[in-house]
Image (spheres, helix red, strand yellow):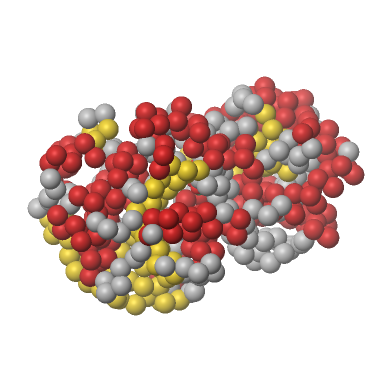
């Protein structure tokens, strides 16, 4: 079976968040399980693409309204990233340093999707399933089912995975002429709330819809940023499948990015070396328990609560806090301003740094995730694998992956995304840490938990099989 994943992110080609991690890992595991899996993403102007050896395999052009865009499909020859990876080069449109946040993102998404489909129609061996990820590629099911140039792709099943329903890619009907001709009776398959809504269209037109944890699928029926009614209507074709992690990349025993490698048997000394590095670099106290946060500084992650959490928990408990993230400028400013106030107790690195994130997972004793919304969350699973105890709000995938120590589990859970709840959770974490025997046993227990994609990749395969038959 031949599966083609289409996505705007894929680790290590281009990463903004967890979407990249999933699209860079799931295909690797699927390839080990009787499938031939490929990924197609935009050709970005970034270091990974510059350093890769590419082979041009196809050239043609697509039409976006009145404009004709030549495109090139490049295959990554090296490095070997565990699956076939293809890049769509469209000069001036996709070959930019960043993945998102350009004024013409809507046009960039559409040109990418049109080029992908145009290329597929040229293939001798077409994919058996096209698997789309998030709104950036969610028009593909509509384009394949209803638009005239791609009617020969109508019989190929499509799967849409919703990683985050907060972002839907809405665009106005003024841009309708960007899409190829289709029977105007089908316009409803694009529409939600009087605009073209790619995510809604994907939910309507994909053969199956998945999301990244069972709890998030349930939550979406109640609150999906306006799409809850649609998700309820389509629930028969929807399923929540818990994400896994890439245990080859995220392995404290072999991870080349951390300061000192370790496994369960030497977790105490191994983590201590990483903690020492963080404390030296960020002027923190090695003798205090270290709490970390890694993530996008946005409301969904509860990042706006962090400044008050820092102030309050440093007042009431004897801990250190280290934050890595970027996002909302106001939150960034507040977090930076606190650095001077809490020298040697708290520090932050505002920005994106893959290597530092690995060192933090390896060095911290606890990882905070006070998310308001968390479709799955990968950080808590990385924390577990690196022997850091997650402190999570009971929501979405966090609820599905972390059990509280009070319920014979291994993490600290709280119900509300509030300063009070998080600070109380931190106090409970300090109590656990003070009982070093219990803390060290819990640490060893969490490192044993298997969150690899081996656990859930087969659920996607079952879906593909059911669609093909
Ligand atoms: P989301 O995709 O919603 O941001 P996830 O928990 O699924 O959340 O995944 C976040 C991924 O991005 C993880 O791999 C995490 O380590 C990484 N990450 C987030 N912010 C940063 C940052 N500032 N620097 C490095 N890595 C980051
Ligand atoms: C999204 C979600 C996150 C999830 C990731 C990978 O970015 O916000 O919770 O883990 O996708 O599926």
Identify which residue, 453 or 50, lies in the foreground: 453
Looking at the image, can residue 323 be seen?
no
Q: Quadrant of the N terminus?
A: bottom left
Q: Examine the image and state in which quarter residue 336 appears.
A: top right
Residue pictured at 50% horizontal, 43% vertical: 240
Is residue 294 rendered to the left or right of residue 407?
left
Image location of residue 81, percent across then percent down? 50, 69
Tell me if residue 193 comes above or below residue 124 in the rendering: above
Q: Is residue 148 left or right of residue 2?
A: left
Residue drawn at (30%, 68%) of the image: 126
Say which of 78 and 306 sits in front. Answer: 78
Q: Residue at x 54, y 69 (%)?
A: 32
411 sits left or right of 376 in the view: right
Report the side of 453 relative to 437 (left or right): left
User: Where does residue 364 sit, x and y in percent of width and height?
Assistant: 72, 47
In the image as oriented, which residue stretches furthest toward the top? 420
User: Percent x, y for residue 87?
Assistant: 35, 66
């Amino acid at each position: 079976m031949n599966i083609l994943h289409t996505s705007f992110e894929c680790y290590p080609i281009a990463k903004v968040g967890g979407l990249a991690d999933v699209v860079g890992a799931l295909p690797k595991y699927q390839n080990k399980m009787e499938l031939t899996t490929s990924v197609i993403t935009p050709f970005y102007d970034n270091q990974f693409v510059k350093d890769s050896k590419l082979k041009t395999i196809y050239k043609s052009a697509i039409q976006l309204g009145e404009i004709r865009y030549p495109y090139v499909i490049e295959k990554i020859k090296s490095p070997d990233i565990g699956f076939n990876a293809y890049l769509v080069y469209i000069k001036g449109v996709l070959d930019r340093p960043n993945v998102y946040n350009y004024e013409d993102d809507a046009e960039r998404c559409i040109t990418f999707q049109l080029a992908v489909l145009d290329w597929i129609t040229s293939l001798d061996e077409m994919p058996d399933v096209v698997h789309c990820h998030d709104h950036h590629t969610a028009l593909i099911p509509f384009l394949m089912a209803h638009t005239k140039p791609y009617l020969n792709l109508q019989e190929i099943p499509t799967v849409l995975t919703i990683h985050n329903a907060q972002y839907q890619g809405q665009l106005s009907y003024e841009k309708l002429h960007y899409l190829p001709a289709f029977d105007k009776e089908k316009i409803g398959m694009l529409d939600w709330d009087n605009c073209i809504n790619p995510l809604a269209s994907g939910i309507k037109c994909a053969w199956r819809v998945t999301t990244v944890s069972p709890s998030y699928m349930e939550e979406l029926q109640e609150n999906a940023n306006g799409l809850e009614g649609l998700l309820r209507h389509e629930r028969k074709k929807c399923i929540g499948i818990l994400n896994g992690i890439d245990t080859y990349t995220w392995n404290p025993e072999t991870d080349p990015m951390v300061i000192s490698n370790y496994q369960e048997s030497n977790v105490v000394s191994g983590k201590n070396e990483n903690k020492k590095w963080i404390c030296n670099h960020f002027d923190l106290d090695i003798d205090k328990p270290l709490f970390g946060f890694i993530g996008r500084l946005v409301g969904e992650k509860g990042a706006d609560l962090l400044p008050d959490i820092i102030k309050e928990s440093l007042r009431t408990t004897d801990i250190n806090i280290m934050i890595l993230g970027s996002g909302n400028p106001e939150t960034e400013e507040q977090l930076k301003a606190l650095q001077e106030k809490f020298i040697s107790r708290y520090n932050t690195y505002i920005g994106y740094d893959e290597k530092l994130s690995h060192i933090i997972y390896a060095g911290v004793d606890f990882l905070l995730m006070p998310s308001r919304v968390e479709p799955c969350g990968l950080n808590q699973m990385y924390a577990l694998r690196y022997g850091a105890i997650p402190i999570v709000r009971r929501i979405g995938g966090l609820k599905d992956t972390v059990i509280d120590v009070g319920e014979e589990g291994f993490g600290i859970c709280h119900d509300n995304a509030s300063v009070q709840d998080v600070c109380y959770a931190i106090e409970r974490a300090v109590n656990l840490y003070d009982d070093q025997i219990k803390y060290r046993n819990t640490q060893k227990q969490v490192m044993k938990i298997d969150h690899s994609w081996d656990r859930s990749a087969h659920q996607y395969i079952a879906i593909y099989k059911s669609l093909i038959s």
